[in-house]
Amino acid sequence: MPETSQVNILLVEDDQIDVRFIKKTFQTHRITNPIYVASDGIEALEILRGEGGREPLARPYLILLDINMPRMNGIQFLQELRGDPRLSNSIVFVLTTSAHDQDKESAYAHNVAGYLLKSGIGGDFMNAIRMLENFLVSIQFPSEQ
Amino acid sequence: MARFPEVNILLVEDDEIDVRSIKRAFQAQKIANPMFEASDGVEALKMLRGEAGHKTVPRPYLILLDLKMPRMGGIQFLHELRADPALRDSIVFVLTTSDDDRDKVAAYENNVAGYLLKQDVGDDFMHTIRLLDCFTISVQFPP
């Protein structure tokens, strides 16, 4: 696998066990992109916008988004993101245990790139990881960003 | 690998040689998803909307979109797609030879899932094909 371009990954996930598991799986698959973690939608927006005295998250970036989180959940986060002219073009994959059609509909209504299930830790999740691996290698981002 | 339900692929591409080479790459990777072809944005919209006289693309589907096409190009197609309540949730990958930043910016403004370069034949293109393969297997499509 050729070296992946330095796409930053913003993992929006409140469950620390899931965060550790996802990071470990990435390492196993030699996905070495820098990973930033936000524990809910509010923190994710702060990181993306560079609030609280920090720089905005450097582009290019890819957002991996959980749905069920305290304070601001994944769908509310998507509403904010798509409503913000500077962030509306972001690429977002949902990564969740929720298989509810309603969540899928809401996510795609906000044009996520894809909806991935965390639950299938066997084959399904491995296919998701392989997909992200190939995604990070193949996807073109605007160079001016 | 089993895919239930089978994801339909709508290839929007005016260049017959590109259509053939993409299909061949899919076959080489043993991607057997049903493939629908539209030669420009106008035809693609008619197929997605199931207009009379056109093949209807059933859900779930994935759109692979060229940018430079006669009648209606890829960016204009994206505008139409995102403005149509029945189609706006569609998943679209751009698949083009254009390395122009303006095209990339315009495509992501319309929330494409990803922007892929066709000119990378060989290894790089195989990553693209493998990406699409894993994508149809792992992604939960709009219900």
Image (tube, helix red, strand yellow):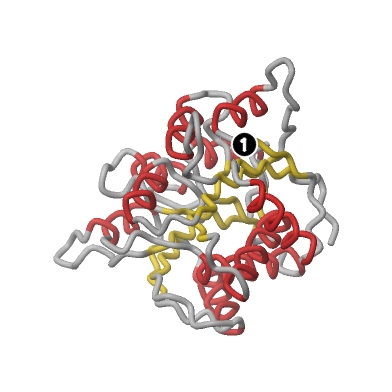
Q: In the rendered image of this protein, does residue B80 appear above or below residue B27? A: above
Q: Quadrant of residue B86?
A: top right
Q: Quadrant of the N terminus of chain B?
A: bottom right
Q: Residue at x 52, y 71 (%)?
A: A137
The chain containing the residue under callout 1 comes to B
Image quarter (top left, top right, bottom left or bottom right) of the C terminus of chain B: top right
The 10 Å Cα crowd at callout 1, few under 14, some 14 to 19, many 20 or more, is: some
Quarter of the rendering containing residue A91: bottom left
Which residue is located at x 53 percent, y 42 percent?
A107
Tell me: residue B74, above or below residue B48. below
Q: Could you tell me the amino acid type at mark 1?
A: Ser
Residue B80 position, x and y percent, is 47, 27
Query: x and y percent of residue A29 in the render?
Result: 60, 81
In this figure, which residue is indicated by the disc labeled 1?
B39
> Residue at 65% across / 64% down in the picture?
A128
Please report the residue visible at 52 percent of the width from the left and 31 percent of the height from the top: B88
Q: Secondary structure at mark 1?
A: loop
**In screen coordinates, is A71 left or right of A139?**
left
Residue B121 drawn at (x, y percent): 59, 69
> What percent of the width, then of the height, locates residue B109?
37, 43
Above or below for A54 versus B53: below
Q: Residue furthest top?
A: B52
**Which of the two residues, B68 or A138, is positioned nearer the viewer here?**
B68
